[in-house]
Structure formats: C-alpha cells, structure tokens
Amino acid sequence: MIDPEHELPISSSVYYQPCPVSEADLWLMRRIDKLHLSYPFAGSRMLRDMLRQQGLEAGCRHIKALMRRMCIEAIYRRPNTSKAAPGHRIYPYLLRGVAITHPNQVWSTDISYIPMAHGFVYLVAVIDWFSRKVLAWKLSNTMDTSFRIDALDEAFSKHGKPEIFNTDQGRQLRGPRRQVVVAGVKFTSEAFTGRLKKEGVAISMDGKGRWCDNVFVERFWKSIKYEHVYLHAYESVQEARKKIGGYIDFYNSIRPHSSLNARTPDQVCFNRPPEALAA
C-alpha cells in the first residue's frame, strides 16, 4: 500500500485527480458545439474568430483543448486525416461504390458531447444507414470503451446484426500533461472490433479524406441537439437519459424525415405503410 505521508516524494500522477471543468469553460463549450454543428469545417482559428464576432475572447490553444475534451474536430478533405491509435488494426473501407438498399446492410456509430445544466455527458448512438433509425444508444460521463460496447450489444439483441459496420479510425492528439488523447471515436480498440468479429460482421473504416462517411450520424447529432438538447438544461444524468430517450423514440417513430420522403425511420426499417403511423 502506498503511504501518502511517507517522507519520500511520490509522483503526483499517483494521486492526480482530473480538474473539474469551470462554468466559464462549460459555457464556452456550448458555444463551440453550436458553431461546430453549423460550420463543421471550422477549425480552432476560425472558431476563435467567430467567437470574437460575438464579443467572446478565447485563445486558439484554449479552443483546441476544449475541442479535444468534446471529441470534435474540423471536418474537411485532407491528405492524411488520421493516425490510428498504436497497436490497433485499421480495416479497409468497404463501402466505396456500394448501393445501400435495405435495413441491416450497414450500421455506423459515433460519440457526441451533450451539455447539461452543470457539466456534460457523452452520447453514443448506433444508426442504420438505410432507414436512419437509431438502433441503440447509451450515455456516459467518461469516454471508456464499455458504454460503446453496451450500445453495440443492445443493437445486436434488438435488431440482429448488419452485414457491414462502418466506423472512423480515430486519431491521436497530444493533450495537456503530455497524455495521448484520441480524438473522435476510438472504435479501433480490440474490445470493440473483437465484438464485431465474434458476430461475423464485416468491419469497414473510413479512409483518407472520407469525411462524409459518417454523415448520417452527423445529421442525427444536429437534429437531436437543435430540436431537443439545446431546449433543455438537464439537471442530472438520469434526467438526461430519460428525456433523450423520449426524443429518440419520437425521432424513430413520429418525426418525418425529408431524406426518407417524409416517412419515419421505423416505417422504412420495418417497411410500414404511412397508415401504420396513425394506428
């Protein structure tokens, strides 16, 4: 057992506790999140200038640090979009030129920052590409792998399994204290890919410059945030879970989608006629 009162110095990392996010930073993160949804191509410098136009002063490095915490980055085509986490296998992109013609053909997943009245949580969602249906989702106050696998297992138990599962590669960024922070989603871990391989699902990962591959999940983030999250100030994780669950039920079964010819994801997924909605 380590004795904290011992005369020998002990590395501060043994007892390091993450500093809570200040109210000022939480407020700034909400502003950055809204700007990112509207202008996903904006990097830290452009966001800094946009915030200045609104009378807000924040340094570029500060904005970069908050973007890392929120797991967001500018989306645009570039020569080398990402470097995989060390020791994690990168799978080829399997969807180039493939027509998406039926449910359970391709699933995808992503993680997004969700602000609350005090603090924030992360939301992971698994979405069917053909129907846009949210198959499963989970909330967590950390970025550990377990809640992503829980969402995947729930999708398997409720909806079977897809032919192809597409994710991004994640990428490494240097965070404060020289820690390696993986931006975006870290779905290259063996725990996650191993679960897919166990089910016999083909794994596809976004290639270089394939910023549009997760566009269906990105559209869901914009819908849920503007139509629900920004209209509420969740007082607790339990309240966030209950209200977000209610919105996702609405999103799947009631909300018409213009990209689905005014049908709902449930109608498309289960091949239901419009009359079934009224029933």
Image (cartoon, helix red, strand yellow):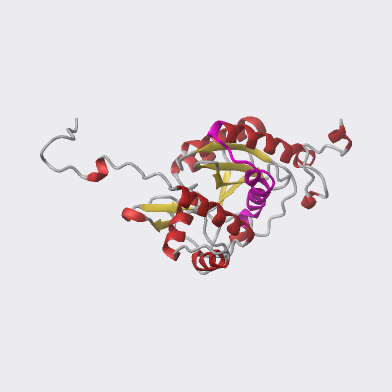
Q: Residue at x 15, y 34 (%)?
A: 5
- Chief secondary structure of the magenta portion: helix
For the N terminus, the image quarter is top left
* 247 left or right, relative to 202: right
The location of residue 264, given as percent across then percent down, is 78, 42
Residue occupying the far right of the picture: 275
Q: Give the quadrant of residue 144.
A: top left
Q: Judge whether 68 appears above or below 194 on screen.
A: below
Tell me which residue sits at (45%, 65%) in the image. Answer: 60
8 is higher (above) or lower (below) than 211: above
On the rendered structure, is 129 left or right of 62?
right
Where residue 19 appears, as percent x and y from the top left, is 37, 45
Q: Let me know if residue 158 appears in the view.
A: yes
How many labels were placed on the picture? 0
Decide whether residue 263 is among the magenta residues.
no
Bounds of the magenta segment: 213-238
* Quadrant for the C terminus in the image: top right
**Magenta segment includes 221:** yes
Q: Where is residue 185? Give x, y as percent.
A: 50, 49
In this view, 91 is above or below 8:
below
Determine which quarter of the picture holds residue 93.
Answer: bottom right
The quadrant holding residue 18 is top left
Q: Please provide percent x and percent y for residue 72.
A: 52, 55
Q: Is residue 163 visible?
A: no
Using residue 8 as the reference point, say whether residue 116 is left or right of it.
right
Q: Residue furthest left?
A: 7
Could you say which is closer to the camera, residue 148 or residue 116? 116
Q: Of residues 235 and 4, which is closer to you in this image? A: 235
Q: Residue at x 50, y 51 (%)?
A: 70
Judge from the rendering whether residue 126 lies leftward or rightward of residue 91; answer left or right: right
